[in-house]
Image: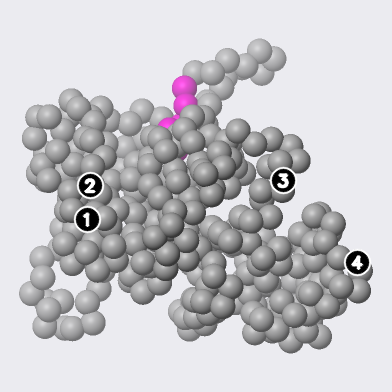
Amino acid sequence: MSNNTLIRVENLTKHFPITRGIVIQRQVGAVQAVDKISFTIREGETLGLVGESGCGKTTTGRTILQLYRPTSGKVYFHDIDLTELKGESLRHARRDMQMVFQDPFASLNPRMTVGNIIAEPLEVHSIGNSRERRERVQELLERVGMSPYYINRYPHEFSGGQRQRIGVARSIALQPEFLVLDEPISALDISIQAQVVNLLESLQDSLGLTYLFIAHDLSMVRHISDRTAVMYLGKVVELGTRDELYSHPLHPYTQALLSAVPIPDPIKERKRQRIILEGSVPSPVNPPSGCRFHPRCSKVVDICKQEEPEWREVAPDHWVACHIV
């Protein structure tokens, strides 16, 4: 892993407008899916992004790739501001950034053969002729552990794990530098999850890829990630190296999340104390004032309800947004 920064996110915000009216629509509110988050991803590393369902993880990944255009903030890729790119320049930049989607059943076109699905990025970017594309597709199928003779089959003929391998093959067809992996194993059986994760790690080593790995399985994120960021209600509340974050979590929400991860030692599992969060996650349409976690935090003080905590580095490469830390 290099210390050079590949992706730099600065105050990234994505709000989805809520409108009313049939003929004349007017905005009456906004879903604050992602709100002023900042972090970096280094060349060759895997940054894990974890949090509860609906906290904004997928929106963050899609906004970084400009699949959703941000409401405000900046995303830099090799010091190129992606938020300023449009049209042909943005299309060219997307060759270096790809995505593996969560649902292997919905992300592949059922009317297209495997060969056409994997070759589509090559056709869009006018790379090679028909014969060269076919050879490239067969090479990619072998690289992800599948037979090149599957090239004329359709997605319904494959299992979920095989479909996800096809999705991975499509994502690396253009030889990108950066992949957003949007919960790539959550829809798969446990035994297949390990195979897909091993494939992703192998591809990262051989191709020099950089990953944003979005997941809610904390034990898997600990296995695959170099650093981990924790999201809550559209905010990144803590970010640190894998070992530091899991052994010394500072934010009360991170502590509660990690207390729910099973420990394979029965004696330690019985002795440890679970942190049970009370109440439910507030609505992103009308988030709480101050720290967004304060209605469910057991360590809340007055300032938490009034002022938003500053995103600061409290130890080398360990960032947190909390007043009491």
Residues drawn in magenta = 29-33
The quadrant the C terminus occupies is top left
Residue annotated with mark 3 = 91
Q: Which mark is residue 313?
A: 2
Three-letter residue code for mark 2: Glu
Residue 309 at x, y percent in the picture = 21, 35
Residue annotated with mark 1 = 316
Q: CA distance from mark 2 to mark 1?
A: 7 Å
Image quadrant of residue 116?
A: bottom right
Three-letter residue code for mark 1: Pro
245 left or right of 224 in image: left
Q: CA distance from mark 3 to mark 1?
A: 37 Å
193 left or right of 250 in image: right
Q: Which numbered disc flags the more N-terminal residue, 3 or 1?
A: 3
Residue annotated with mark 4 = 129
Residue placed farthest to the right in the image?
130
Within 10 angstroms of label 2, few (less than 14), some, or many (20 or more) residues?
Answer: some
Q: Is residue 93 visible?
A: yes
Q: Which numbered disc flags the more N-terminal residue, 3 or 4?
A: 3
**Foreground pick, 121 / 299:** 121
Residue at image point 60% right, 33% down: 84
Q: Which numbered disc flags the more N-terminal residue, 4 or 2?
A: 4
Within 10 angstroms of label 4, few (less than 14), some, or many (20 or more) residues?
Answer: few
Q: CA distance from mark 4 to mark 1?
A: 50 Å
Q: Which mark is residue 238?
A: none
Residue 149 at x, y percent in the picture = 81, 85
